[in-house]
Image (cartoon, helix red, strand yellow):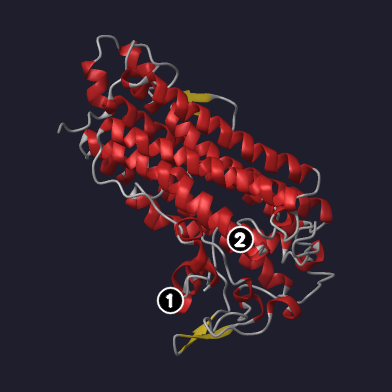
């Protein structure tokens, strides 16, 4: 099995320099190679993580404006920036599962669900005050200048990125102790969604950050936490954006594999995200339990868009294209064209399934525009809403089955796609 060519090697082999210069805009040759497909897959990753970093920096700027002048209008602007920052990031999740460096890192920025009582005040009538599984369930870092963690008294006077990353994140080995990332910031901007499966997101007031007219106490520390979490997320995104640049750790690890291993990385990410993660853990499980706590963006009620862009990321990778936040496109050698060269019917079927998934995701987006966000759709006795969600799950399962056919077509060995009890063993969910 041959080793993958690096982008430099591909350019040296090209007969004209311009062929390398336009590799992200079009496929000039009549056919593509597996090597070129894998290299372009890395190029898309570089663009996506770069956009994720850019939008996170915009979010930081709007948060700074809000904290300087904590009005409802400025809070809404920060929330809008958070939602915009999710657009490129969610399209990156297809790079999980196959790329170990991404999977090991992902929990820093997108871990969920979280026990939000670790971070700030909560409604005890809905949240409770303690958990048998988590001693820090209602620790409230914002209101506490010291905490008992792992039998040790920890000074939390200064809320810094280092405190969040190295002391609080997964404190006591509990995964639900999520102190950083998109969802920690989401909670700080929206607060708890106390509407259950009825319409409505979190309703945190801007005055929670108003030093002169403070509500719910500790407005200065709450602002410190929001700044620290945002700065930490930006540094984490900088790390991953650099990992996909020329010479970066993720790109090197990918291109140092054999061609078949590179294709396996792509297909593992596609199938595992579609089936076990998005179809199962993030969608089917919440539908089975009719539980809004299983909603991915549960404070903002932005889950419909997160699911849409997760699915979009899979389609991007298969088609070898990505629309950047500035409106430009990254296009190049695609898995789609590679498959079409061997089995045009299989390629057409995969495109059909991807389009069906996108249509099902769009139906949830359209429902949200009418007030039926994901938590409303999964409510018990919402028959039509439940069916919209189930159609999305079914489309992801169908898409995964064709991904498995592609794996067989390419004769790629050793791929194990992520599963989910909600799809593979539904009865166990209720045990």
Label 1: how many residues lie within 10 Å, few (<14), some (14-19) or many (20+)?
few
**How far separated are the C-alphas under marks 1 and 2?**
28 Å
The residue where tag 2 is placed is 288
In the rendered image, the residue lying farthest to the left is 1
The residue where tag 1 is placed is 173
Secondary element at tag 2? helix
Q: Nearer the viewer, mark 1 or mark 2?
A: 2
Locate residue 119, reporting x and y percent. Answer: 62, 72
In the rendered image, the residue lying farthest to the front is 427
Left or right relative to 41: residue 360: right
Locate residue 364, reporting x and y percent. Answer: 69, 43
- Which residue is found at the position 66% from the left and 64% from the top? 291
- Which residue is found at the position 53% from the left and 72% from the top? 177
Secondary element at tag 1? helix
Number of numbered discs on residues: 2
Label 2: how many residues lie within 10 Å, few (<14), some (14-19) or many (20+)?
some
Would you place residue 32 above or below residue 377 in this image? above
């Amino acid at each position: 099995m041959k080793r993958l060519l690096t982008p430099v090697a591909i350019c040296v082999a090209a007969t004209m320099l311009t062929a390398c210069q336009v590799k992200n805009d079009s496929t000039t040759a009549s056919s593509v190679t597996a090597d070129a497909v894998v290299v372009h897959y890395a190029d898309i990753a570089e663009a996506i993580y770069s956009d994720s970093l850019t939008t996170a920096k915009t979010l930081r700027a709007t948060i700074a404006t809000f904290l300087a002048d904590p009005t409802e209008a400025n809070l809404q602007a920060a929330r809008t920036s958070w939602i915009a920052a999710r657009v490129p990031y969610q399209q990156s999740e297809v790079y999980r599962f196959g790329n170990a460096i991404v999977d090991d890192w992902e929990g820093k920025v997108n871990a969920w669900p979280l026990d939000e009582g670790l971070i700030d005040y909560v409604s005890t009538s809905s949240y409770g005050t303690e958990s048998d599984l988590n001693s820090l369930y209602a620790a409230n870092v914002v209101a506490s200048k010291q905490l008992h963690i792992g039998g040790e008294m920890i000074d939390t006077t200064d809320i810094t990125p280092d405190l969040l990353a190295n002391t609080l994140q997964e404190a006591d080995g509990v995964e639900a102790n999520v102190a950083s990332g998109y969802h920690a910031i989401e909670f700080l901007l929206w607060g708890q969604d106390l509407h259950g499966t009825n319409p409505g997101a979190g309703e945190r007031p801007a005055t929670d950050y108003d030093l002169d007219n403070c509500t719910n106490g500790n407005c200065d520390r709450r602002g410190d936490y929001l700044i620290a979490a945002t700065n930490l997320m930006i540094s984490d995104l900088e790390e991953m954006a650099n990992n996909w640049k020329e010479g970066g750790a993720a790109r090197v690890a990918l291109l140092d594999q054999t061609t078949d291993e590179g294709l396996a990385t792509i297909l593992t990410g596609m199938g595992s995200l579609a089936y076990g993660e998005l179809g199962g853990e993030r969608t089917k499980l919440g539908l089975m339990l009719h539980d809004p706590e299983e909603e991915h963006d549960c404070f903002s009620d932005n889950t419909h868009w997160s699911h849409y862009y997760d699915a979009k990321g899979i389609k991007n990778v298969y088609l070898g294209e990505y629309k950047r936040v500035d409106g430009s496109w990254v296009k190049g050698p695609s898995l789609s064209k590679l498959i079409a060269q061997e089995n045009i019917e299989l390629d057409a079927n995969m495109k059909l399934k991807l389009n069906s998934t996108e249509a099902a995701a769009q139906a949830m987006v359209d429902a949200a525009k009418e007030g039926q966000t994901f938590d409303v759709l999964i409510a018990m006795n919402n028959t039509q809403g439940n069916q919209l969600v189930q159609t999305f799950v079914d489309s992801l399962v169908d898409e995964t089955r064709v991904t498995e056919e592609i794996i067989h077509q390419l004769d790629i060995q050793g791929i194990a796609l992520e599963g989910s009890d909600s799809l593979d063993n539904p009865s166990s969910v209720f045990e």
